[in-house]
Amino acid sequence: MCIRTRTLSIIGVLLLILAAVISPILYSGYADLHSAQTALADKKYDEAARLFELAATHLIWRADLWEQAGLAAYRNGNNIEAIRLLEIAHDKKSLSSQGWETLGTAYWDNSDHQMALTIWQEGSQSYPSDVVLYDRLALVYHENGDYASEQKVLVKRLSLASDASAHYELGLLLTLSDSDRAVTELESASSMDPQFDSAVQTLQAAIAVSDTESDPAKRFIAIGRGLGLVEEWGLAQNAFEKAVSANAKNAEAWAWLGEARQQNGQDGSDDLNQALAVNSNDAIVHALRGLYWKRQGNNIQALTEYLQAAQIEPDNPAWQVSVGDAYTKTGDLVSALAAYQKATQLVPNDATYWRLLAMFCLDNDLYILEIGLPAAKQAAQLAPNDPQTLDVLGWSYSNAGLLYNAEQNLRHAIKLSPDLAIAHLHLAENYLRQGDNTSAFNELNLTVQLDKEGTSGQSAAQILNQYFP
């Protein structure tokens, strides 16, 4: 046998041996892959993750299977395992845009926000047309207070595809620098999704007030207050910091900065003290200081501040309500009642203050028939289609023993606002007073569904446990 023939023979034998070794591995790999796909279809994500990993170790050229394993682990709720598997896919440079997004989300869910940011930044470079990655980046930048980076990301994101939330977030950022563009973005958000209507209207009003101010500090205060009203306290703090920088002698800028810091989990007392030092004759300063002491549980000091605000602006009904609330917390219900009544006298045509007077009587079981119910009736006369006012009227009737009138008004409130949990709770309690346990049971369950984590929902759950164990 010639050398060439002998060599070919040896190669053939080696190939047969190699085939004998590899064939079972290939068979096992494809079998695991098929089983993984079946488990995934059956939503057995833990099993799917394990089988995709086995398939990936056998079918070494299928680096994409590591991502499939990681995605299945994430869907199973196992963030640690998802991170391990997706990082292998990352190292093998086989992550799809979904893989990048999920790996970052797994880190985020595991409280490693910095690593989530790094992953999403890298992913957006690999997939520069993927809007989801930009949405994730915007979320992190917003949380970190890196508003310049957030704005750049949102502009890029919107250049790829329009989105109501992205327009809204960009509009929020622009309120601090470009009011015209801010209004355009906010209007786009509102036109695309009605859920933004209320917030957009609030911000538009704040921008309108800001545009009338020539003083930069006052402009930033107006914007900051608007941002606070829509619960954007991080941006609001930024606005108030700009106000203080523009005019360190503006007491309200310091006071609002203190309020924003509290809303963001900081103390804020230094700013409030600075506000008082700058101007001790400013009602807003005293009112925000009163709110600070109220949060601290120091009701006496809160009352002192609110009384100061009311003395400076005796015709402002809001300060009278704050005084009334502070007196209530100190146990002086007589003085509290007088303060609430004074608020209604200052603005007799405003339903809000009549409703608050009625609520005070209800909450403290005080003069419900003599003062509370008449106040609720006056509020309903001024605002006949306001669900909250009708709820207070119905609950006043119920506590006064007029159960039929109570039911009619509570039903009317619910008709106007079907998701008003407290009205359902009050209707349920009214049914209990009528002896209609079946209707009460239904309303209580509905209250829990509407407000499971809220005060009304928890109260309903307690009544259900008491009456329907």
Image: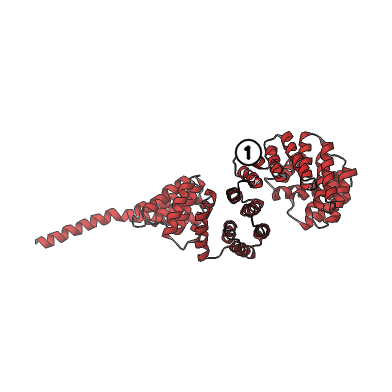
The answer to which image quadrant residue 193 occupies is bottom right
Using residue 79 as the reference point, say whether residue 386 is left or right of it: right
Q: Report the residue that reaches farthest toward the right.
A: 370
Q: Dot 1 surroundings within 10 Å: few (below 14), some, or many (20 or more)?
A: some
Residue 50 in picture, x, y percent from top left: 43, 49
Secondary structure at numbered mark 1 = helix
Residue 135 in picture, x, y percent from top left: 52, 57
Quadrant of the image containing the C terminus? top right
Asked whether 406 or 158 is in front, the reply is 158
The residue located at (83%, 57%) in the rendering is 384
Amino acid beneath label 1: Ser
Asked whether 434 or 6 is in front, the reply is 434
**Residue 24 visible to an observer of this rendering:** yes
Using residue 45 as the reference point, say whether residue 317 is left or right of it: right
Q: Which residue is mark 1?
A: 269
Q: How many marks?
A: 1
